[in-house]
Image (cartoon, rainbow, N blue to C red):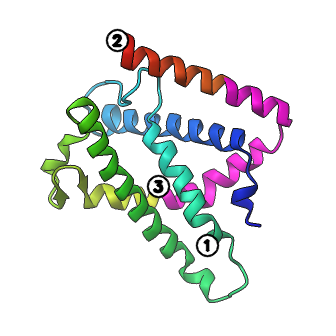
Amino acid sequence: MDKTFKRSVPLLFISFMLYAILGWCYEVFLEVVVYDWGFTNRGVLFGPYCPVYGVGALTFLFVLDRIIRKKDVYWFNFIKPFIIFLGCMFIATLIELIASYILEFATGSWPWQTYAEYKYNYQARIALSTSVRFGLGGTLFMYVVQPLFDFILSKPSKKTLNMIAGGFLFIILVDCVYTFFIK
């Protein structure tokens, strides 16, 4: 059985949350440092996380993990990073497109409408330059960040992982209630 499917639900949920938090940090870094726009909360929820990054990371794991672990064909190792890059680029772009439609339906807009200013874009929902960044980021994720997270998350006991996942679940549920029903 593939290692991806041996990961427990709490471990996958912790990974989801860690990537959602990293995604939020990436978005804020771009906004504050790269574009010099000033700070705004880049997530759709109150907390410092962008769930779409967690969805993307888990999708990368489920779709591309088998490819990255394949080592029995020597020549394949040379083209594998390019396949991972294209796979991450396609998956992340598709998720972003779907997320834009979901957010537009749920809230009336989507947070990244600035894509209209990009040369190659589709309905200002997705853009080629961001797709390339997603491909590069996804490749870095698959080769560096996820192996590091796997190593770090292999250390705590199952009980500790369950408690961490439960804490994250409680936080996200409270945030959803606050964001969608109270705020």
The residue positioned 41% from the left and 25% from the top of the image is 45
Residue 85: image location, x then y, percent: 47, 68
Circles 1 and 2 in contact, beta carbons < 8 Å: no
Decide: is 142 above or below 25: below
User: Exactly how many numbered labels are in the figure?
Assistant: 3
Q: Which of the 4 quarters of the picture holds residue 93?
A: bottom left
Q: Which residues are magenta?
A: 137-166
Label 1 residue SS: helix
- The residue to which callout 2 is attached is 183
Cα gap from disc 1 to disc 2, whole angstroms: 43 Å
Q: Name the quarter where the C terminus is drawn.
A: top left
Would you say residue 93 is visible in this rendering? yes
Q: Earlier in the sequence, mark 3 or mark 1?
A: 1
Q: Name the amino acid type tagged 1.
A: Ile
Residue 67, disc: 1
Residue 137, disc: 3
Decide: is 63 above or below 164: below
Q: Relative to 33, is 24 on the left or the right?
A: right
